Amino acid sequence: MYARWLTQAGFHVEQAHNGLQALERAFELVPDIVVTDLNIPGIDGFELTRRLKQDPRTSRVPVVAVTGYAAFAADPGRAQRAGCDVVLEKPCSPEDLESTLRTFIDGAARS
């Protein structure tokens, strides 16, 4: 749902089926921003974010988590400690996600 919305809004969207594939693609493509759920197969979104932030190729790439993951509710700071720049709780409208992404992209363009 989000990928289709963002594509129609003019974003170039690459998708991955699990955390390890997402990590490999991010290292290969070095995207402008990463959107992930915290509860994904393979390595979870917390570990994905930690690895992205530890690698010099992707350490400055903003990570936005969109999640309804119960572990987030139990410890909301865990995502920030892992390196997530923003966490949006589900249900999250596609418009809210788009607005958040544009804020990061607009900020990067001004830098």
Image (tube, rainbow, N blue to C red):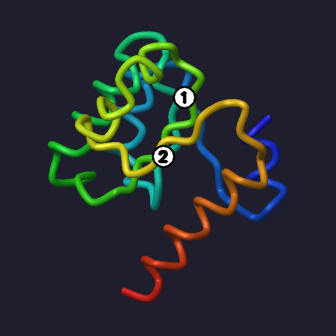
Q: Look at 54% across and 28% down and name the residue there.
A: 16
Q: Which residue is mark 1?
A: 16
Indicate the position of residue 31 as horizontal and vertical percent values: 44, 55
The residue carrying pointer 1 sits among few (fewer than 14), some (14 to 19) or many (20 or more) residues within 10 Å by Cα, namely few
From the image, which quarter does the C terminus lie in?
Answer: bottom left
The residue carrying pointer 2 sits among few (fewer than 14), some (14 to 19) or many (20 or more) residues within 10 Å by Cα, namely many
From the image, which quarter does the N terminus lie in?
Answer: top right
- Indicate which disc residue 40 carries: none
Amino acid tagged 1: Ala
Q: Look at 71% across and 53% down and name the residue there.
A: 96
Q: Farthest bottom residue?
A: 110
What secondary structure is found at the residue carrying circle 1?
Answer: loop
Camera-nearest residue between 33 and 64: 64
Camera-nearest residue between 85 and 25: 85
Indicate the position of residue 88 as horizontal and vertical percent values: 57, 41
Left or right of 99 on screen, residue 52: left
Q: Look at 50% across and 13% down and name the residue there.
A: 70
Indicate the position of residue 10 as horizontal and vertical percent values: 76, 64
User: How many numbered marks are there?
Assistant: 2
What secondary structure is found at the residue carrying circle 2?
Answer: strand
Amino acid tagged 2: Val
Indicate the position of residue 103 as horizontal and vertical percent values: 56, 70
Q: Which residue is mark 2?
A: 64
Compared with 47, 65 (above or below) is below
